[in-house]
Image (spheres, helix red, strand yellow):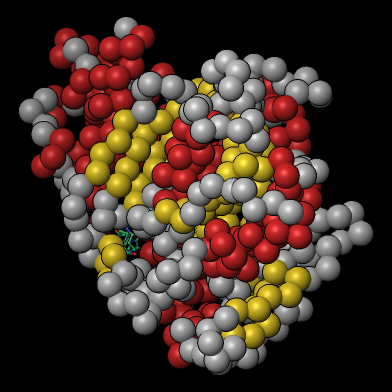
Amino acid sequence: MGSWPKDVGIVALEIIFPSQYVDQTELEEYDGVTAGKYTIGLGQQRMGFCSDREDINSLCLTVVKKLIEKHGIQYSDVGRLEVGTETIIDKSKSVKTVLMQLFEPHGVTDLEGVDTTNACYGGTAALFNAVQWVESSAWNGRYALVVAGDIAVYAKGSARPTGGAGAVAMLVGPNAPLVLDRGIRATYIKHAYDFYKPDLTSEYPTVDGKLSIQCYLSALDNCYQLFCKNVAKNYNIKVTLDYFDSVVFHSPYCKLVQKSVARLALNDFVNGPENKRQELFPGSEAYNNVSLSNSYFDRELEKAFLGYSKEAFCKKTSPSLLIASQVGNMYTPSLYGGLVSLLISKDIFQLAGTKVGLFSYGSGLAASLYTISVSKDCNEASPLFKLVSSLQQVKPLLQRRQKVAPEKFEANLELRERNCHKAPYEPSGSIDHFFPGTYYLTKIDDLHRRFYDRIPVAANGHA
Ligand code: ACO
């Protein structure tokens, strides 16, 4: 094999989300909670959801086919394919093997990689595997394709408005416009029962909401502290929020992301020189002895640091929350939906040459903080221009979705609940609302084998 491949990272990116959504203001009224709880308290506007016509296989088939078609990739250009998901419909057969239906007709079966699972972290684990494969002696010169997909549904109650669904596909290779920086990323993995899915007959997780927030924020603290050390050691740079042009987070709900930026500011306060505190954080005397591990639910402290970090949030993070607020928590694709949102929210000249921090969190728990360097080259022939231009359909597609009343949304979840893992099964949901190019379930036979069909693509070749 030739020389060490340069600038390994994301070459192309594709996202899909459900064509139906429920409005969070209408859901507040329907659920009988106070107005503003979901929209202001959680920061969510709309929630995408799937009918009984979609499952994890159909979502992943749709997003892979869309990426391949839109970017003119040959199936034989791909040498590794793996999936990150926590939407388990089979305890043995991977989603990756289902996706092989797209590759086999082209004679492509030499594809390493299977599925990776740990709550919302599986997509990041798959991405790291893909980058490492390209950088390794096993690399055969072809692209790796990473798929992150999930259907996030919760039992009736306070967690339900934090659902969502979607899938992301990322083509990984050398000379990429979005390069994963080497040698500085930080990981934090621990045993916790904050959110898990022990009941294999149900789609719903068992959730300790408060503990999950504490786990998320403490994983962020730990990853950030280690990241700061790694950068100081390798580059002799002291990291603060200023180090990043943008920071993208796994988004269970948008308000938690805003609190996460405040948390990074608190870390900067703790890490910074004491004699500069009043200058950088005016009026912060009361927090001089603050301990990171004892402050997760200190509302006064949180409010103060939400204030100190407001400008940073608006500039560095808010643009990445479009899809999260419009679709909800997509679980494994959530962080990458944040990356897509960032890429479509700015002018390419504002993106070129910037440094993006990414925080990935999966309950249970596994978390990493890493950075992407965006290529400086943004002329019309550049890979960055190609990647960003290919995402211009995302905003119009969000608008083209169909709004469904909360009653129908709830009936849909009840239908999924009743028929989860049922075989044989004939799905009854309409296929009229699907975007062109969407794969959907046609039947499950008595041996639990699943069959799919596809909505024809539009005349322009895609949705
Ligand atoms: N107007 C404005 N804000 C309001 C209103 C209102 N009318 N009513 C409530 N709020 C605020 C609350 O003050 C609270 O704000 P705070 O967090 O700043 O204190 C917020 O809305 C949420 O309300 P709560 O009553 O505290 O929380 P709730 O019991 O509704 O549960 C939770 C929220 C825990 C996030 C729940 O939805 C859940 O369990 N979700 C799934 C787990 C999750 O997403 N965890 C995050 C990390 S793990 C993962 O990614 C899955």
At x 46% / y 77%, what residue is drawn? 29
Tell me if residue 235 can be seen. Answer: yes
Across and down, in percent, residue 314 comes to: 48, 35
Q: Is residue 260 left or right of residue 90?
A: left
Examine the rendered structure and indicate whether residue 124 appears above or below residue 198.
Answer: above
Query: In which quadrant is the C terminus drawn?
Result: bottom right
Q: Is residue 35 left or right of residue 424?
A: left
Tell me if residue 410 can be seen. Answer: no
Q: Nearer the viewer, residue 246 or 361?
A: 361
Query: In which quadrant is the N terminus drawn?
Result: top right
Examine the rendered structure and indicate whether residue 87 appears above or below residue 296.
Answer: below
Residue 341, quarter of picture? top right
At x 48% / y 89%, what residue is drawn? 422
At x 59% / y 40%, what residue is drawn? 144
Across and down, in percent, residue 128 comes to: 45, 37
Residue 340, quarter of picture? top right
Across and down, in percent, residue 446 comes to: 55, 91
